[in-house]
């Protein structure tokens, strides 16, 4: 595996561990507990590696959601995890500051004009983002409030805080 790919995987794994640490903080005052397991991910050019997956379990021992790592090779992002529950699935992507953009160049030879248009709205800093409205391309930084909104989207579980 090339050194560049190893660095990308390491960044992704570091970001996953940071997100899971945040999730553990966000669920502290609830009856939910987190169970971490390891998944093997296989990506073209990157080979196989292991990444943590996080299952959230309610006070009755029922699974609420699984936060499943997908990988680093994501169009427009540096990584993705899926929140999978009984009623749906939502993706959260790892984006750089200002996020990805579409660059167009118009003209020829010495008379070229380049323009960059952001792919998503609302990206203020690097981090994990939920693209809530794919038509409007609105991105929301994953914080405690957005985390609970995503949980509600994919499961019947609603946290009353």
Image (cartoon, grey):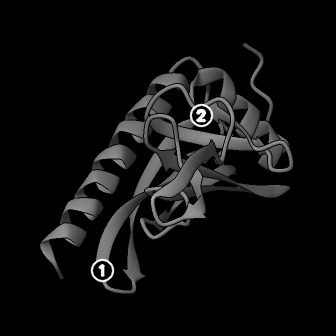
Instruction: Residue at 80%, 37% (x, y): give it.
Output: 152
Q: Quadrant of the C terminus?
A: top right
Instruction: Residue at 56%, 50% (x, y): give it.
Output: 113
Q: Is residue 154 left or right of residue 77?
A: right
Label 1 crowd (10 A; few <14 / some 14-19 / many >=20): some
Q: Which residue does the numbered mark 2 point to in the structure image?
A: 32
The disc placed on residue 46 is 1
Report which quarter residue 103 is drawn in: bottom right
Q: Are marks 1 and 2 in contact (CB under 8 Å)?
A: no
Q: Looking at the image, is mark 1 or mark 2 nearer the viewer? A: 1
Q: Nearer the viewer, residue 66 or 140?
A: 140
Report which quarter residue 18 is drawn in: top left
Q: Position of residue 93 (x, y in %)?
A: 55, 50
Marked residue nearer the N-terminal end (1 or 2): 2
Q: Nearer the viewer, residue 53 or 28?
A: 53
Instruction: Residue at 60%, 61% (x, y): give it.
Output: 107
Residue farthest along the left direction in this orientation = 3
Q: Is residue 100 left or right of residue 158?
A: left
Q: Position of residue 80 (x, y in %)?
A: 52, 58
Q: Position of residue 153 (x, y in %)?
A: 82, 43
């Amino acid at each position: 595996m090339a050194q560049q790919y190893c660095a990308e995987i390491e960044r992704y794994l570091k970001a996953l561990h940071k997100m899971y640490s945040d999730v553990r903080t966000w669920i502290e005052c609830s009856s939910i507990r987190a169970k971490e397991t390891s998944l093997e991910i296989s990506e073209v050019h990157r080979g196989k590696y292991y990444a943590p997956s996080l299952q959230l379990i309610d006070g009755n021992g029922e699974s609420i959601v699984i936060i499943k790592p997908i990988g680093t090779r994501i169009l427009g992002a540096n990584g993705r995890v899926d929140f999978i529950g009984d009623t749906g699935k939502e993706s959260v992507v790892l984006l750089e500051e200002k996020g990805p953009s579409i660059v167009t160049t118009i003209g020829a030879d010495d008379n070229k004009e380049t323009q960059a248009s952001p792919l998503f709205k609302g990206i203020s800093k690097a981090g994990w983002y939920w693209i809530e409205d794919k038509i409007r391309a609105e991105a929301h930084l994953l914080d405690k409030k957005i985390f609970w909104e995503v949980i509600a989207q994919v499961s019947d579980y609603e946290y009353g805080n």
